[in-house]
Image (cartoon, grey):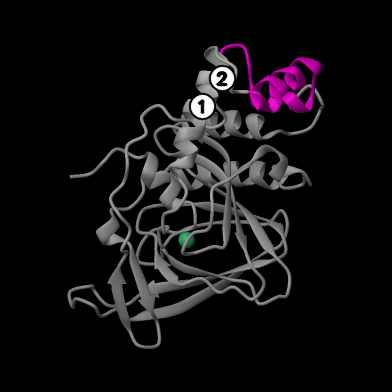
Amino acid sequence: MSRSGKYTVAGFMQDAKRILETDLPLAEKQAEIADRMSLLSQRDDLTRFAIPIGPADGSTQNFLLGFEPPFTLLGLSQFDPHYLSPVHEHGDFWVIACGWRGVDRWDMYERKDDGSIAGYADLELVDQIFLPRGRTTWMPPPPRSIHSHNNETGALNCELIFTAAEPMKVEDRLYYDVEEKTCWPSLFPPATIFPGTRWPPDLPGHHLHAAETCDHGRADAARLESADAPGPLGRALVSARAGVDALFGRSNCPSCNLIDSIARLAPARG
Ligand SMILES: [Fe+2]
């Protein structure tokens, strides 16, 4: 908990990292992290701590709340009214989702063929998971790590997404046409290297999230807003912004709308 007594993004990230470092089986880690996402989802002000990173091919807007190299990421994925995402492959790239605004529906598929025929895929709808505020789910392993997002309402949907898994290789990220039984690889450009990039910026003696709780934080936030001023703080923010700017303007992965962000932060693959 923060000095305000609220559960914060920073507090969540600390908890998640601690859980990830335990010897628990992955499913138990995911369950524990999901519980904390549910707690965090009770806040109404999450976007106050997030930076928008643009739309993706599985969502209409994304917000980055926290990132720790190499792959630990917390974000918000948003879906316009009546937006239905492509059905897409996750492979071993697991994500945890927690409803926040509206009610997203994850349609879950199992791949029935062995993938040996290029361009062919036989998928079966195996589940539909509704995500009202505070309800969580996470991606199962293959061959059931395939899903779509579905907003059949006239209002925005938005959900928390967390992962600490390495993104899939671009060529393995498949899009599916369930009716035509076809699939094709993602057309995303290669990943870009952003070593050491994190969000919020790692500044000595400062944490952006402290701005909500104390005068010191507010003072630092004000200084950040005038980052044109020289000095280590301004330079750190400019560096961080450069990393975030690089997240814009790209089509996203077929996965949970934040994969592209992760891929761009991941080591380049040969
Ligand atoms: Fe996804």
| 215 is within the stretch colored magenta | yes
Q: For the N terminus, which image quadrant? A: top right
In the image shown, does 179 or 17 lie closer to the viewer? Answer: 179
Q: Is residue 205 magenta?
A: yes
Q: Secondary structure at mark 1?
A: helix
**Foreground residue, 104 or 211?**
211
Query: Would you place residue 134 above or below residue 1 in this image?
Result: below
Q: Which mark is residue 234?
A: 2
Q: Which residues are magenta?
A: 204-226
Task: Look at the image and tell me whether residue 202 can be seen.
Answer: no
Give the percent coordinates (x, y) of residue 57.
46, 64
Q: Is residue 210 left or right of residue 15?
A: right
**SS category of the residue bearing label 2:** helix
Q: Is residue 109 above or below residue 205?
A: below
User: Residue flagged by tag 1: what amino acid is it?
Assistant: Val
Check if mark 2's residue and mark 1's residue have beta carbons within 8 Å.
yes
Residue 150 position in % (x across, y down): 59, 72
Q: Residue at the location (42% across, 39% down)?
A: 71
